[in-house]
Image (cartoon, helix red, strand yellow):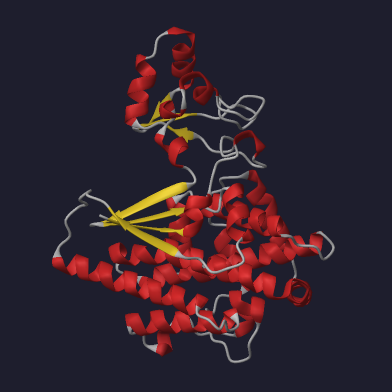
Amino acid sequence: MICEYPDYYEKFHCIGGSCPDTCCAGWEVDVDEESLNYYKSLEGPFGDRLRSHLKEENDEVYFPLTKENRCPFLNKSNLCDIYIELGEESLCQVCTEYPRYFMDVGNYEQIDMSLSCMELGRIFFSDPGPVHYIRSENDVLGEELAPEEENELVHVLALRNEAIEILQEAPLRPLTEQLKDVISLVEDAVSLDPSVSILEGEEANVLSAAYHHHNAAFISETADDLLQLMTKLEVLDERWTNELDKLGKFAETDFNEQLKLFKKTLGSQGEHWFRRLSVYFVYRYFIDASMDGDLMRSLRILIRSLRIILRMAVLRFKEQGGSFTQMDMADVCHLYSKEVEHSDDNVEIMKAPFDKG
């Protein structure tokens, strides 16, 4: 099998109790079958404690959160009692892997990490250079694909790589121009009729409005459309409800004024962060087109994600009186990723055509 992963993958190490937003709070922990069988077999007081917290519902088993919204095994020092008592090998699969994820298609495995992890965000946005991808091979055999499926995978990966190259090609151009080329690349690949393309619209309405250029043509969804779409998401973190409420009160005229200050204050650093973020979403979601056959879905989640994160960043900038740091960028992306990327239903909403009804 061919495995591919970004260079920051090898730089990550969990910081445990020092994490500013531990992954052991706010999310119910799914228990995989192997871990479940092990927990059921354990004797003694700790085995009894494990079993007392297991909940089975709709063919799923998990540890429900406490009234403090924490995993029942997260102690006062923000450390895991299962890890302390039984060792790392005794953790559930989801706890062992997070924030890593693995996507297997045929004999290709795409590996990445989620920006919902604050420590990964710190590493990701502190890198001053482009994202590099590393390939390796092993003897594991993946699921055999039909010839047409294999061809589709090769085509999608080539297009994904071309999009990433456009975004990081030296010498760097303004991000808006690079995103325009990525959009054109996808439009050409799916042979859309421009008269019905969702990518026609006023530049003031788009993500890349972040870095305005006069002849841009991006998605036609307005800021109100975008916020309405966000209200359709299943809420996974109470911070999201508060964030969405503030964004709804962020008037467009005020946003545009703050956006100019945001761009002026952050300069090339801000553009660099959003460029890396663009690459993150391209790498993460374009491969899905090899399975659902729809590159436009991958493009929608790229553009919509960048747009909403931009608005969140500019709002944070305003609230902090014109200050916005690398850790602010990591936290904004952490909040967005935690809300969207850990729910299949929410990802589907971000990919689907927008229905105003």
Quadrant of res 94: top left
x, y percent for residue 26: 58, 38
x, y percent for residue 178: 52, 81
Measured along the vertical axis of the image, is residue 136 above or below residue 267? above
Q: In front here: 197 or 180?
A: 180
In this rendering, position of residue 207 left or right of residue 169: right
Q: In front here: 218 or 355?
A: 218
Please name the residue shown 47% across and 84% down the image: 181
Measured along the vertical axis of the image, is residue 60 above or below residue 312? above
Please name the residue shown 46% across and 57% down the image: 347
- Residue 164 shows in the view: yes
**Furthest residue in direction top, as rendered:** 44
In this rendering, position of residue 271 left or right of residue 196: right
> What is the quadrant of the N terminus in the image?
bottom left
x, y percent for residue 324: 75, 62
**Furthest residue in direction right, as rendered:** 321
Quadrant of res 309: bottom right
x, y percent for residue 42: 39, 14
- Residue 198 shows in the view: no
